[in-house]
Amino acid sequence: MYTEGGGGRPGDTDVKVNIAGLNSTSFSRWAGLTGKVPRITVNNGYCFAGNAALFGAGDIRIATKKSSIGMAGPAMIEGGGLGVFHPDEIGPVSTLCSAGAIDLLAEDEAHATALAKWVLGYAQGSIAPTPAADQQILRTILPDNRRMAYDVRRVMDVLFDTQSVVELRPVYGRAVVTALARVEGHAVAVIASDCRHLGGAIDVDAARKAGEMMELAKRWKLPIVSLVDTPGFMVGPESEAMGAAKVMPELFNTAASVDTPWVGIFLRRGYGLGAMALVGGSFEFPTITASWPQGEFGGMGLEGAVRLGFKKELAALPEGEARDALFEKLLAEMYEKGRATEAAAYLEIDLVIDPSESRAVILRGIKKR
């Protein structure tokens, strides 16, 4: 649906309505297509009021850089006594991308149309297998230092079919990357941790973003592939003030209704409720739950677990080398206990894999019903 327009017009003379025309069926019929057909909205230019409602209700929302999209245009805002604004000031794409209201940003309408065709393909099933990068690269793609960050998009570019990754909402909820991709031609929805933002901790925006990707996978009947490296949910008073106690648990509700295959691959850290949420609510939920050898697991981040669990022992030593040495010793012991091989031995995950075997594991998982 191309959504450019200013919405309804009070006093319209070429459309006859009774009273307010609020018995229009356009919005309910558009919403009624949810889960029945893919719904892609494309906007170029001004899009206000009812037009914006139709745009925002799409499964995938594509806007050009010259778009302004708002639930009311300048006339309605002024009529409501809220001030006088130029249309360009209402819902510019820079604001909407940061707020997660736009999935893909296009240069112009032709580019937006090309993007619409591209993403539509992921809802239309498998295509002929396409090439992929040398999977041996995955063996050395993570830094040796477990505390060092890396770009998970590089992992995705190697793991999935060449040039098949379409990232959605890249500047919103940055602790999680969401994308459409293919494995040997099979379309999948991807949810991946980005440890370069908040160390991969899932904040409120990232939780919403991940949940909405699960919803899209359910609507379009796409298998889900989770690439996890997270210390868990983002905590603290600021996070709670943003509604964490409501938004984050909603991930479990959303995931529970997903009925497509789900493959969870832990690239490195899998801690706490946040790690559980990224694989459907439990390590038992995915069709296959696998880990790379670097995988480490625990009820919370290891550093925090040591500081909390051994607070008295650490406080008993003076600040300096002795305390630091004890901390590193306890951390190493906890790391050994939480290694991927230990988690597999206790059946918390299904298997530990050579990273180069990840594509084979994904294919095995998404073909199971």
Image (cartoon, rainbow, N blue to C red):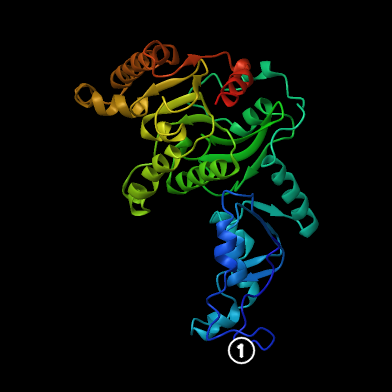
Q: Is residue 316 above or below residue 14?
A: above
Three-letter code for the amino acid on which mark 1 is drawn: Gly
Q: Quadrant of the C terminus?
A: top right
Residue 257 in the image: state x and y as whole percent: 45, 40
Nearer to the camera, 129 or 75? 129
Q: What residue is rendered at 68% in x and 40% in y? A: 122
Outermost residue toward the right in this view: 110
Residue 118 in the image: state x and y as whole percent: 74, 45
Question: Is 129 left or right of 254, judged from the image as shown?
Answer: right
Q: Quadrant of the N terminus?
A: bottom right
Tell me the SS state at disc 1: loop
Tell me the residue that label 1 is attached to. Answer: 11
Q: Is residue 90 above or below residue 277?
A: below
Quadrant of the image occupied by residue 220:
top right
Residue 139 visible in the displayed image = no
Residue 174 in the image: state x and y as whole percent: 53, 44
Nearer to the camera, 218 or 341? 218
Q: What residue is rendered at 35% in x and 19% in y? A: 331
Residue 40 visible in the displayed image = yes
